[in-house]
Amino acid sequence: MDKRITAAAAASKIKDGMTVMVGGFLGNGTPESIVDALVQRGVKDLTLILNDTAYPDRGAGKLIVNKQVKKIIVSHIGTNPETANQMNAGTLEVEFSPQGTLAERIRCGGCGLGGALTTTGLDTLIEKGKRVIEIDGARYLLELPLRADVAIIRGSKGDEDGNLIYRGTSQNFCPLMAMAADVVIAEIGELVKVGDLSPESVHTPSIFVDYIVA
């Protein structure tokens, strides 16, 4: 199966109201061409699961600026003033999740686990509405798993089957998101032939990737 599609074709697989995981760390590891295609297409009422909303002109921040998002599950919004503006105006729902907790929730979603226990967020606003479990006298928050309809991620290098290698901070969320969505679309910076990648260097095996944009 040829997994290669255009950015426009990738964007067409994301419909109004879908939940979408967006890889990257302040834009590093974000599939910019797919995001741009989503902006152009105007898909709306999205729920985004992502580490941060990057910048107004970079990464998923462009979707925020274009008012295509109704809710985000996120660990940080400080570098994109428009996110805070929409949150304060009540037009964007923001669910904050500490960065490590967010990663663990996505991992649980990908591995079929029922959730993660953590002390992070106890006795803070993060605890509101969540179940607290006591084990051997210690209190933990139960953080529920996260999954998405579609994950859009970026590999710095990959082959035609979709085996991916990440560079730098893009290694944090992209591999987890590739396991936690019904459809996974990977933008690839440098596309190589099957067999050109050392198996030991692959971070995400091709079995998790449905489509590639290169």
Image: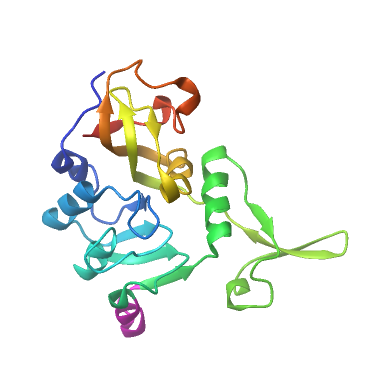
Residue 27 within the segment the image draws in magenta: no
Snapshot quadrant of residue 85: bottom left
Where on the picture, by quarter, is residue 158?
Answer: top left
* Quadrant that contains the N terminus: top left
* Quarter where residue 94 is shown: bottom left
Q: Is residue 172 above or below residue 160?
A: below
How far across and how far down the image is residue 90, in percent? 33, 81
For residue 86: magenta?
A: yes
Q: Which stretch appears magenta?
A: 84-92
Residue lying farthest to the top in this orientation: 195
Residue for point 33% across, 39% down: 156
Q: Nearest the camera: 49 or 45? A: 49
Residue 3 percent location from the top left of the image? 25, 26
What x and y, as percent, mark residue 12? 18, 44
Closer to the camera in the image, 196 or 83: 196
Where 123 falls versus 140 (above or below)? below
**Magenta stretch mostly in which secondary structure?**
helix
Q: Residue furthest left?
A: 40
**Quadrant housing the C terminus:** top left
**Drawn side of residue 100 relative to residue 66, left or right:** right
Residue 145 visible here? no
Is residue 121 something that shows in the picture?
Answer: yes
